[in-house]
Amino acid sequence: MEIVGRGFLARSLKPLAGGHPGAVVFAAGVSSAPSTAQAEFAREAALLYEVLDHCRARGRRLVYFSTCGGGLYGTGDGPSREAGPVFPATPYGRHKLAMEGVLRASGVPALVLRLAYTVGRDQRGHQLLPSLLRQVRSGTVHVHRGSRRDLVHVDDVVAIVDALLARGAGNDVVNVASGFAVPVEDIVAHLETRLGVTAERRYVDVADDHAVCNDKLLALLPEHARPAFHAGYYRGVIDRYLDGPDTRPLREA
């Protein structure tokens, strides 16, 4: 398997590099959902075009990481599904949807994985859990009132990629999420419990209570490869992050 990229997700996928011949995983996209930098989007697009040419020339199939956040799906009634309507609410969401359109028109077999908030070691500091951890440790944390986040551990993402490629999945769009959108307050509270501290909350009225359906993912995965998703799964994600060999977020580029 060829892995395109050098960041957090690409590094996490390295254990799969020796398997899945004929697959190319594009893990070099923009990593910041709030990003509005058109130059960053343009760089990702240009690299994706090159990788698609490579896949066409060599008969490869591609795995592309998109997002299942509210920035792509927008707001709506009930959990968002892959076949449902998409109303991108942010530049990042519109960019990811445009890249998905490029893949559909490319003629290359492509598996689009719309990721939830992925958590793991060596993440950059702007990403959700490292940012909240840094704030809690500082004694003050900014909380978007009423917001919820679906957390998934990067080790589970890697196992899901492995299982989907093993069964030959392609030309499909799949939400990769736990299926449980957790109040950010609960995430902060578990961080406080683990660290033995209490942080002052400063609330911001930017509600985002977006939820994602993972029924399609669970149907595609063999039973032995399904992560143990449940209402308290997020606590295990946080624990694995804190108990890992290195929980210090990388410096911003």
Image (spheres, rainbow, N blue to C red):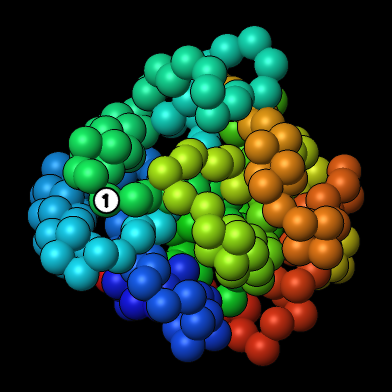
Does residue 231 appear in this view?
A: yes
- Determine the secondary structure under disc 1: loop
The three-letter amino acid code for the residue at tag 1 is: Val
Residue 106, how many percent across, how many down?
A: 20, 43
Q: Which residue matches tag 1?
A: 108
Residue 130 in which image quadrant: bottom right
In the image, residue 246 above or below residue 238: below
Relative depth, front residue between 153 and 184: 153
Residue at image point 60% right, 24% down: 80
Which of 212 and 82 lies nearest the eye of the viewer? 82
Residue 239 relative to residue 57: left or right: right
- Foreground pick, 154 / 85: 85
Count residues near mark 1 (Cα–Cα under 10 Å), then give few for <14, some for 14-19, many for 20+: many
Estimate the x, y position of residue 39 in percent, counting from the top left.
11, 50
Which residue is found at the position 75% from the left and 72% from the top?
Answer: 240
Q: Is residue 72 left or right of residue 5?
A: right
Question: Does residue 208 appear left or right of residue 156 in this picture?
Answer: left
